[in-house]
Amino acid sequence: MDKTNIVIGTIGADAHMIGAWVLTKAFQEAGFGVTFLGAVVPQQEFIDAAVETNAKAILVSSMYGMGIIDCEGLRDKCIEAGLSDIILYAGGTVAAPLELEKNWPEIEKRFEDIGFNRVFPNTVMAEDVIQILSSDLGLSE
């Protein structure tokens, strides 16, 4: 069976990439083909890499609290590039830390409203993301 390709990186002006790197290693060990873009990645680079590798998902990391802003418009750009079915995940400290603690359901709703399939807090375990993505892609039994 061919590997399922995914694209991972840290979006926008965020230079934090440890979380994305940890996920990269975990996804590789789980058998996924992973394109790791590193940090400070513009939206278009995620899209270009997804098109080039025929990726089934884009996983966006953000730890500096501005993730919601950096992610706005990504779904529309994916659709324009012919990636209307690609799964979009965001994770990390995707909003101001106090907002994350007090308003997680609202954060999830905001990401859903801009076209993301799921958003994860910075406390999520890599194994959980792998299991959920596998299920979302129809790879789990």
Image (tube, rainbow, N blue to C red):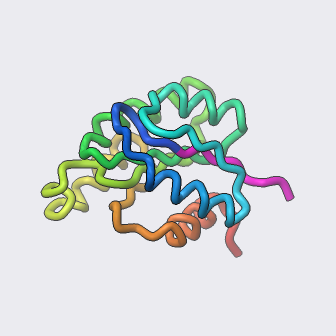
Query: At 83% across and 53% down in the image, what residue appears?
Result: 2
Taking the image as shown, residue 78 lies to the left or right of residue 113, namely right
Furthest-bottom residue in view? 141
Q: Residue 75 appears at what percent x and percent y? A: 46, 35
The total of numbered circles placed on residues is 0
In the rendered image, residue 97 lying in the magenta stretch gets the answer: no
Query: At 21% across and 58% down in the image, what residue appears?
Result: 100
Q: Residue 32 appears at what percent x and percent y? A: 70, 57
Furthest-right residue in view? 1
Query: At 53% across and 58% down in the image, what residue appears?
Result: 23
Position of residue 67 relative to residue 126, above or below, is above
The quarter of the picture where the N terminus appears is bottom right
The quarter of the picture where the C terminus appears is bottom right
Q: Residue 93 appears at what percent x and percent y? A: 29, 53
Taking the image as shown, residue 48 lies to the left or right of residue 59, namely right
Position of residue 94 relative to residue 104, above or below, is above
State which region is magenta.
1-8
Position of residue 18 relative to residue 113, above or below, is below
Q: Nearer the viewer, residue 12 or 25?
A: 25
Q: Nearer the viewer, residue 107 or 49?
A: 49
Query: At 59% across and 43% down in the image, what residue appears?
Result: 36
Position of residue 48 relative to residue 86, above or below, is above
Q: Quadrant of residue 52?
A: top right
